[in-house]
Image (cartoon, grey):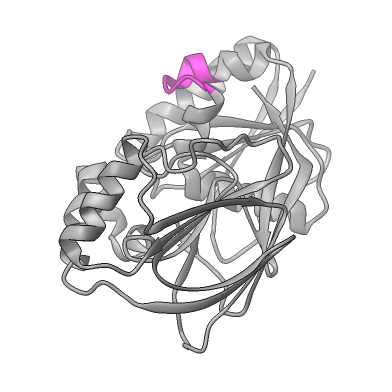
Amino acid sequence: MPKLLLLYSRNAGRQKLKSVINAVATTFEGAGALVLHKELNFDENPFSDIDNIDIVVAIGGDGTIGYVVSSMLLKNINLPLGIVPAGTANDFATMLGIPHNPRKAALHILQSPIRIVDCGRVNKQFFINVFSFGLFTTTSQRTSDRVKRYLGRLAYIIKGLGELRKIPTIPLLIKTDNDEFDINAAIVLVFNGCTAGHFPFARMSRCDDGLLDCIFFTRRSIPRLILDALRYLGGGKPASIRYIRTHNLCITSPLADIPTDTDGQKGPNFPLDVECIAGRVQIKG
C-alpha cells in the first residue's frame, strides 16, 4: 500500500481547496493508498518531521510546486512528486500535460510512469519553472492572496498595468558557459519551464534538456517595449530582446536591493549564481 503525502497551500488559486483535497484524497484512497495531509507553512520545511513516504503530492500553483521541490532538495529527499494544479497560472503543470481537474490529476499521478526533469538553482534556492527580476516579475509577490483568489490571472494583469509607469533600468554583467556581455535590462526571465502566465516566452525550452533558457528585455520606452514583446511572442526576433541557452549563468549589477522571484516566491539577493540541475526531480505524471 503506497503512502502519499498531500501538501497544499490555502493561498493557491481560486478553486475551493477543501473540495480539491477531498476529491484527490478520495481518488487515492479508492486505489488503496494511505493518504496523509499537511498544510504548507512557507517559513518551514514541510519534510522536517515526515518520513516513510512513497510519493509526495503538491496541490497548488507554480509557487507551491516550486516551494515543495526546493524543500525536498534542501533535505536531499529523492521521491516522486505528483502535481495537482490548483493555482492561478499553473504554468509548469500545463507544460507537462497534467489535467487541471483534481480527480483526473490524481488518476494521472496513479497511472503515469515517473518522468525525470531538471530544475534550476539560484544561489541557495531552487526553482522548477522560472526565476526572474525586473518589470512585472515580482507582481505575484505584491498581489494579495485574497485578490488572486477572487480575480485569478486578472489580478496579475491589473497589478502589472500599474507597473508600466515605472520601467526599471537594471545594468547587468552576464557571464555564461561561453559568453560575457553587458546589458541594461528591464526584464530578465530564466526558464526551466517554457511559459509565464501562459505566455510562451521560452519557446525552445524543455525541462529535461540540461539547459536554462534566458530572455533579456532591454530597457525601452513603454510603447517600444510593448511592441517588441508582442512581436517576440508572435514569433519575431526584435533586436531589443536577447535569448540565450546555457547551463550556468552568473549575473551581477552595481545596483543594490533588486527584488527577484523564484516561481512566484521571494528570490535571493544579488549577485546571482544560476545553474541548471539536470535530471534531479522525479515527476509522477
Residue 49 seen in the current view: no
Quadrant placement of the N terminus: top right
Q: Residue at x 66, y 53 (%)?
A: 120
Q: Residue 122: within the magenta?
A: no
- Name above or below for residue 75 compared with residue 60: below
Q: Residue at x 31, y 35 (%)?
A: 234
- Name above or below for residue 36 compared with residue 42: above
State left or right for residue 119 relative to residue 223.
right
**Number of numbered labels in the structure image:** 0
Q: Residue at x 72, y 53 (%)?
A: 247
Q: Foreground residue, 201 or 175?
A: 175
Q: Residue at x 20, y 68 (%)?
A: 221
Q: Foreground residue, 57 or 187?
A: 187
Residue 191 seen in the current view: yes
- Where residue 38 appears, as percent x and y from the top left, is 59, 44
Q: Residue 100: within the magenta?
A: yes
- Name above or below for residue 206 compared with residue 161: above
Q: Foreground residue, 203 or 239?
A: 239
- Where residue 259 appears, as percent x and y from the top left, is 44, 74
What residue occupies the far front of the structure in this picture? 239
- Where residue 214 appears, as percent x and y from the top left, is 54, 54
Quadrant placement of the C terminus: top right
- Name above or below for residue 264 compared with residue 6: below
| Quarter residue 110 falls in | top right
Q: Foreground residue, 269 or 194?
A: 194
User: For the magenta stretch, what is the residue range?
Assistant: 97-105
State left or right for residue 154 relative to residue 1.
left
- Where residue 60 appears, as percent x and y from the top left, is 47, 40
| Quarter residue 275 falls in | bottom right
